[in-house]
Amino acid sequence: MNNFLQRHRLETPALLCLALAVLAALSLAGSSGLQRTVTEVLVRVVMVVGMFIFIGHSGLISFGHMAFVGIGAYGVAWTTMEPSIKQYVLTGLPDFLQQAALPWVPASLLAGVLAASVALLAGAVILRLNGIAASIATFSLLAIFNVVYSNWDSVTAGSSSIVGIPTPVGVWQAFSFAALAITLAHWHGISRFGLALRAVREEPVAARSCGINAWRQLLVAFVLSAFVCGLGGALDAQFLGVVNPDAYYLGRTFTCLTMLVIGGSASLSGAVTGVLALSVLMELLIRLETGVSLGGMAVQLPGGSQEIVTGLAMVLALIRRPTGLMKGRDWQWPRLARPTTPASSAPLEMQAR
């Protein structure tokens, strides 16, 4: 029985990583455009998995996690750009950042640590609140990030874009960090921290009576999710080579939350499935907006169709399948598959496995 449980614990992240590895390998046989699309999908996986770590286990909707993505993106810009460029564009940076030109991996990890540090300070206050009040507070955090970074001209170039960021991130680099994000999310889910947080979510009174500190467990998940989101922002900046405050505001917040809701916020597999499903839909709509030829007839959707269809998809998902495409379940090998109860309603002992 113990051997089975150990395999069951490892099979979900193994299957998710295997699926993403196959996707990455297949993209290398295609055009450069396909490789860029797959890289973008893998970067989204990191962001959405980061949001899942907090939202999925706590049950609280956070509108502020895109701020951590933006913090990570700007953090990696400060540490990887050529000093000669920063001296003219970002004159307000401290001397140690002005002279810094770190390799992309340590710079990305430091960007994640920076996002986690901000989450530690902000979460210590925000997570004293409950329910809708906490969600509104996270939205306030996103608004504060946008206002500060849009007006801090000497450090962030204000509302202008920072260009000249090195772009070493490709398909396999993005896959490596996506695998890391999945591993961290899975570890948190099966650890005592994840079990305690789900106990707080399901039975807050009983959890507190057992000595579980709800605020502490929420803060641990909040900081870890911010770290992963910061990694996603670092990858995004080093994939596009440009950062802008508005790129990490309402539009991308809505997109990532939609992916999480459509896939199912109650499971790690749901987060990844939502990214893959909605990314395919978005790519199809983008191509239809630019115009395609079907049977000699030109078909072109009006501009903005992508946002409209994405919104409708989220509404339909909430109405027809509120638990998402995965219904709270995780990917399993067919020979090990067995009926499971969605994580949102399963006994806590089963959720820990």
Image (cartoon, helix red, strand yellow):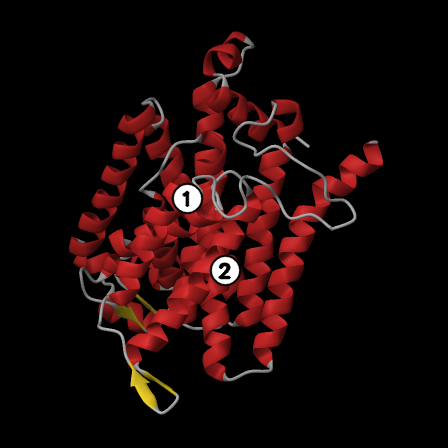
Q: x, y percentage for residue 269? A: 57, 48
When asked about the image quadrant of residue 79, the answer is bottom left
The image shows residue 222, relative to residue 113, as above or below, that is above
Task: Specify which label sits upstream in the sequence, 2 or 1.
Answer: 2
SS type, badge 2:
helix
Q: Could you say which disc has been placed on residue 320 in the image?
A: 1
On the picture, is 163 further left or further right than 282?
left
Q: Quadrant of the N terminus?
A: top right
On the picture, is 201 further left or further right than 294?
right
Q: Could you say which disc has been placed on residue 276 in the image?
A: 2
On the picture, is 204 further left or further right than 21?
left
**Total tally of numbered discs in the picture:** 2
Check if mark 2's residue and mark 1's residue have beta carbons within 8 Å: no
Could you tell me which residue is drawn at 47 percent across and 46 percent down?
50
The image shows residue 242, relative to residue 93, as above or below, that is below
Q: Could you say which disc has been placed on residue 70 in the image?
A: none
